[in-house]
Image (spheres, rainbow, N blue to C red):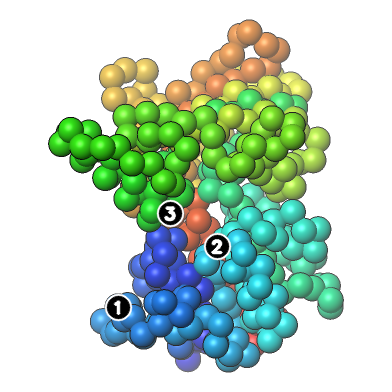
Amino acid sequence: MSQKYNIAVAGATGAVGNEIIQILDQRDFPIDNLYLLASSRSKGKKIEFKDQEIIVEDLAEFDFSKTHIGLFSPGGEVSAEFAPKAAKAGCIVIDNTSHFRMNKDVPLIVPEVNAKDLEEFFLDKNKSNIISNPNCSTIQMVVALKPLHEKSIINRIVVSTYQAVSGAGKTGMDELFNQTQNIYGNQEIKKDKFTKQIAFNAIPHIGSFLENGNTEEEQKMIDETKKILDEGIKVSATCVRTAVFIGHSESINIEFDSPLDEKKAHEILLKSAGISVIDHRKDEGYVTPVEIAGEDKVYVSRIRNDNSVDNGLNIWVVSDNLRKGAALNAVQIAELLINKYSNYII
């Protein structure tokens, strides 16, 4: 009989937590016991999983010593408090929040890109027992860039993102829906989650502003890309929230240290794991967020040379931010753990 695992999902009632639960079911993750955790406000709620109803428990009261892996997405402050407690109890935590990402003792993992970083992690007897999931916009970018970087070293990236409101959680989606409804109903437009009206709009502001002029989201993309892919890459990011429910899009300009033209890039990406290339120079010959909601892959379109710089290339990258950008990536990390490092988690 194959090994089964006790899995905890913290933040189970949130948008990402809900996706994690669905993906565990869809991918038939080998689960013995599934524990669904949230705040005391959600205690007692019932969530369906594999034709059964699981009662949501209070995260603050839960004993993590009975779990092997914890999939966390309860928000940064909550993870900061409870992830170390779970890790200390022997549970390996895969955390979706930004809190631990730049901690030097915490690996930041995208399985298609830097799975090997887990080897050093598990050899460390004093390991933190915490693994971080990168930012959603970082994940899809590095998946697309890794195979190109292996062929020709990337010197610089300039990325502009067009990010869905689901990246701000259920409240972000509700705000877009309500504002849109109110505009058509000639009602008052209320803004709460976003700094400006999001319906029929684009807001170049995700996260707080930093002293250097970047927003937190932009700085995350810069720092995380360096940690995951290559410290030597220069990154400039502009992150924009758009009136899209699900699916982040990115326009990425890349400068290589040696020639890598559009034809070769197309061939490389076509053969790469986790990537789907849809790139036809005609109407509808590219991917937009509407088509990829609920899909697992990172989609690449508009591959073309940038002749304004030496060794330049432009690509358009789209992915479901709730799946590959968060929940799926976390579950893929868990699959890596049970397939390659099961001796460390039993």
Residue drawn at the location 43% of the way across and 72% of the way down: 12
Q: Quadrant of residue 51?
A: bottom left
* 323 or 181: nearer the viewer: 181
Q: Which mark is residue 75?
A: 2
Quick check: can you spot residue 20? no
Q: Picture coordinates of residue 323 (x, y %)?
A: 43, 55
Evaluate if marks 1 and 3 touch, with contact meaning CB atoms under 8 Å apart: no
Q: Is residue 184 left or right of residue 133?
A: left
Circle 3 SS class: loop
Amino acid type, residue under disc 2 in the picture? Gly
User: Tag 2 or tag 1, which sits nearer the N-term?
Assistant: 1
Q: Is residue 58 left or right of residue 133?
A: left
Q: In this rendering, is residue 284 above or below 28?
A: above
Q: Picture coordinates of residue 38 (x, y %)?
A: 46, 75
Residue at which label 1 appears: 48
Evaluate if marks 1 and 2 touch, with contact meaning CB atoms under 8 Å apart: no
Mark 1 neighbour density, 10 Å: few (under 14) some (14–19) many (20 or more): few
Give how far apart the Cα atoms at labels 1 and 2 are. 23 Å
Residue at which label 3 appears: 169
Number of the front mark, 1 or 2: 2
Circle 2 SS class: loop
